[in-house]
Amino acid sequence: MSLVVRARRVVLPDGERAAAVHTDGGVVTAVTGFDDVPAGAVTLADDEVLLPGLVDSHVHVNEPGRTEWEGFATATRAAAAGGITTIVDMPLNSVPATTTLEALRAKRAVAAGQVAVDVAFWGGAVPGNAGELRGMHEAGVVGFKCFLLDSGVPEFPPLDDAGLRAALAELAAFDGLLIAHAEDATVIDAAPEPAGASYAAFLASRPPAAEETAIGRLVAATRDTGARSHVVHLADGDALPLLRAARASGVRVTAETCPHYLTFAAEDVPDGDTAYKCCPPIREAAHREALWAALTAGDVDLVVSDHSPCTPELKRPDVGDFGLAWGGIAGLQVTLPAVWTGARARGIGLAEVVRWTAAAPARLAGLRDKGVIAVGKDADLVAFAPDERFTVGRLEHRNPGTPYAGRELTGVVRRTWLRGREADGSPLGRLLRRGGR
């Protein structure tokens, strides 16, 4: 199947310009001048920009086992609607957790035939499974997720310092990647218990020092083992000097943040509105602005959703208690407009947003065919109207709860193509292994 799409604005690896993108068999075959097209080419409207499909390397699909929380069909439909053409599924909240080769095979089996975009998989690093890591790596997982404190689900226990170093040492042997939920249990145990409707009280229960202490542990273990590591969902702007210094000294550590940390601020979270609860928490505006500055400086590498939904009752809307509610933000479908709305307000261009949400996540996950519009890459394309405003309503996620509900955002995804075919929510996706197709 061949497709040619042209636009007056196309975001390419070397900048933005008018161009025509030629594809055949699901792959980009040429990028030519705007007028160099055959009959039947798709021409975007004057208010549309052609982007590469986004890559979201941090999505909790939760299937099998907790499919009522999300599921491959609904998560990937939401992704397609939001211009995301590849997701990488997290290894926890599903049952079984993806901590063995057998569990990986079960996850792939249940996903097959129902994904609307391409899907790759993380494995999990938990106590006692170091012997499983190489087998899962060879089977194609993009890397391994660990927690440095209680994950919230019993089937995915955290690594202590000895377990962290054992996992990193094993991964260093084949240059595997460890990604870490970096909060420190000792710091949190010493903080006030979260309880009630007060968001300020919940915020105090997970102080910035919890992130800084855990990141320090991760950096030290990464340096000592020579491995690669990555900090997921960074919320604490005060941790940035630690990461900057580690990288400057040659430690192979990277970091991501999320749209909710770039959009919301603790000062504005309503008491009792547990849709905003996540861990680490949404912090004050000063942290938000520090994360934006870190992205533009290159100290934070990428922006991904950490889409972590649950059933409505687990958010405890009946009592609005932040101590009892499940912690997780549902926002997969609005990643692009949320990030673009914030970037535009700060004078940041689309090329930077695409780098953070497409090219960098693809590079982190080792998906070499994704994340940019270039010859030989998958023909994953998005028609995006960057000036159109909309109010967030019903989304394609299985459960509707989200802190973005009713919020006005700028930027509308009008069409998405997956490997040259219109991504209309039907099961066109493939299951990917690390490296590519």
Image (cartoon, rainbow, N blue to C red):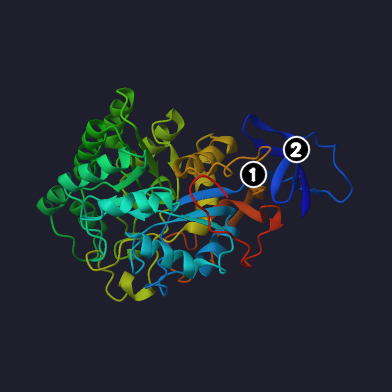
Residue type at tag 1? Leu
Nearer mark to the viewer, of 2 and 1: 2
In this picture, residue 151 sits left or right of residue 334: left
Residue type at tag 2? Ala
- Residue 303 lies, in percent from the top left, at 45, 44
**Displayed quadrant of residue 228:** top left
Residue that appears at 77% across and 55% down = 1
**Residue 324 higher or lower than 302, as above or below:** below
Mark toward the start of the polypeptide (2 vs 1): 2
SS type, badge 2: strand
Examine the rendering and report whether any part of residue 296 can be seen. Answer: yes
**Residue 22 higher or lower than 306, as above or below:** above
Instruction: Give the residue at mark 2.
Output: 30
Residue that appears at 39% across and 42% down = 256
Q: Residues within 10 Å of mark 1 (few under 14, many from 20)?
A: many
Residue that appears at 25% across and 40% down = 169
Q: Work out whether residue 282 or residue 134 is closer to the camera in this orientation and state it.
A: 134
**Residue 206 higher or lower than 68, as above or below:** above
In this picture, residue 134 sits left or right of residue 74: left
Q: Work out whether residue 51 or residue 86 is closer to the camera in this orientation and state it.
A: 86
> Which residue sits furthest right?
39
Examine the rendering and report whether any part of residue 397 can be seen. Answer: no
SS type, badge 1: strand
Instruction: Give the residue at mark 1.
Output: 51
Q: Residues within 10 Å of mark 2 (few under 14, many from 20)?
A: some
Whole-number angstrom distance, CA of label 2 to CA of label 1: 15 Å
